[in-house]
Amino acid sequence: MICLDTNYLILGLQKGSSESRQLVRWYQAGEVLVTPMAAWHEFLCGPVTGPQVATMRAFLAEVIPFGEQQAAKAAELFAATGRKRSLKIDIMIAATVMLADAPLATNNKADFRALKKHGLTLI
């Protein structure tokens, strides 16, 4: 299973992008592609069209809910990484990914770097 960050959802729709090519390779190889609810929310904030949403949703086996366990993990990570408000959504994404025991596909590695020492795996 591979969790997709928001930038993979957005850039995966751009024909010829490296993210688009990688999504197709993973999908054709039978990888289970999912995304955290927080990343899906960011994606839906767009701008995206209905057909774009349907296309990306077709690639995803699941949009992983953000529930009580994810909230507790995100709060723990928020405190452990210096309580940076600018990273709250990224921390929610990381918490969901970590509890799913999967790597995160992102091209925004800088914002997630501090979370690697807490167990986040990046692709």
Image (tube, helix red, strand yellow):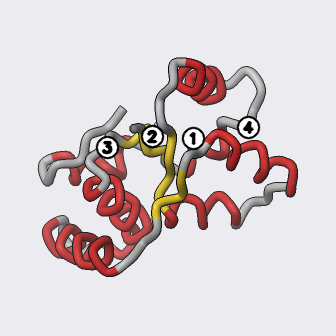
Drawn side of residue 11 relative to residue 116, left or right: right
Question: Distance between the Cα atoms at labels 3 and 2?
Answer: 13 Å
Label 2: few (<14), some (14–19) or many (≥20) C-alpha neighbours in 10 Å: some
Label 4: few (<14), some (14–19) or many (≥20) C-alpha neighbours in 10 Å: some
Front-most of residues 57 and 104? 57
Q: Is residue 81 above or below residue 35?
A: below
Drawn side of residue 26 relative to residue 74, left or right: right
User: Badge 2 is on which residue?
Assistant: 106
- In which quadrant of the rendered image does the N terminus lie? top left
User: Badge 1 is on which residue?
Assistant: 8
Query: Amino acid type of disc 4?
Result: Leu
User: Badge 3 is on which residue?
Assistant: 102
Do the residues under discs 1 and 2 have CB atoms within 8 angstroms?
A: yes
The kind of secondary structure element at disc 3 is loop
Label 3: few (<14), some (14–19) or many (≥20) C-alpha neighbours in 10 Å: some
Label 1: few (<14), some (14–19) or many (≥20) C-alpha neighbours in 10 Å: many
| Image point (60%, 67%), residue name | 41
Q: Which mark is residue 13?
A: 4
